[in-house]
Amino acid sequence: MYQLVLVDDERYIAEGLTNLFSWEEIGFEVKCFCSALKALDFIENHNIDVLMCDIEMPEMNGFELCGKIKDSGIKIVIFSSYQNYEYFRNAIQFKVDDYLLKPVKREDILKCFGKIKEELDTKYKLSEEKPLTYYEQIVRKVIQYIDENYKDASLESAATLVNMSPSYLSKTFKTHGEMGFSDYLTQVRMKKACELLDDIQYKMYDIAYYVGYDNPNNFTRAFKAYYGVTPKAYRNRER
């Protein structure tokens, strides 16, 4: 199931398009937003395949939103009430996959997303046909990156390292590795924290900083969530 984010500041339009028909029947799961900023936050923290957005919105317009995700590999569909030359020119510059006019008709959606699904199917089919060793090399390279840079490691930096979009790397790492990127990063940080906790010369706030947490309280919460005990309790345990 491909992931689609739909954005329009007019709630009745966003919800109307979401409920226009059963998106799942054509292979898409939809999350709708009336705020471009909230949509961007969601996109940056989830694996999204397609963005469908209006142009004229408060806080951030549709093209500004497209600019924020231009290197992510996410497919883009613009829908608008305006047949405006500048809008069409911008759409071409952002290499949008389609430009639909409001009111958007059901048949236009079916035609547009039928084509997009075919392209996504082809993309992932071709990817799956690559030798398994290709993905194993990617995973190994990312694991090495995390092991050596766990303090400042990020999905975005890892994606740049292996020439993938963050969303595609996230899927690849989870599919061909033993766990997701963030889970592995947390595991490495927690194991390193245990090593440092066994050495009483390190203060708690130093350990938090060394393993990638600017706030010691956040480190304590993460450690307890992972091991079930606080760092202090772990340090004071009987050995």
Image (tube, helix red, strand yellow):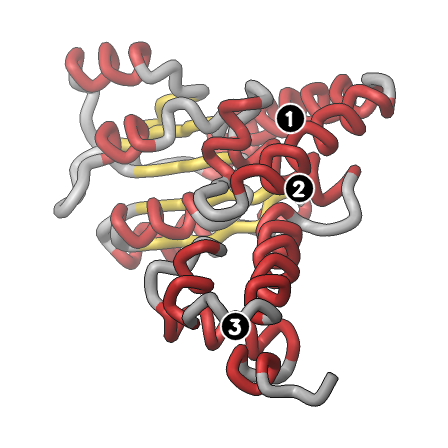
The x, y position of residue 50, in whole percent, is: 49, 35
Q: Is residue 73 above or below residue 231?
A: above
Assess disc 1: are there few (<14), some (14-19) or many (≥20) residues with their C-alpha within 10 Å of its C-alpha. Answer: some
Q: Earlier in the sequence, mark 1 or mark 2?
A: 2
Marks 3 and 1 close (CB-CB < 8 Å): no
Q: Is residue 75 above or below residue 202?
A: above
176 left or right of 35?
right
90 left or right of 127?
left
Assess disc 2: are there few (<14), some (14-19) or many (≥20) residues with their C-alpha within 10 Å of its C-alpha. Answer: some
Q: Secondary structure at mark 2?
A: loop
Residue to which mark 2 is pinned: 27
Mark 1 belongs to which amino acid? Leu
Q: Earlier in the sequence, mark 3 or mark 1?
A: 1
Residue to which mark 1 is pinned: 120
Q: Secondary structure at mark 1?
A: helix
Residue to which mark 3 is pinned: 200
Mark 3 belongs to which amino acid? Ile
Q: Earlier in the sequence, mark 2 or mark 3?
A: 2
Mark 2 belongs to which amino acid? Gly
Q: Quadrant of the N terminus?
A: top right
User: Residue reaching furthest front?
Assistant: 201
Q: Residue at x 43, y 45 (%)?
A: 43
Q: Nearer the viewer, mark 1 or mark 2?
A: 1
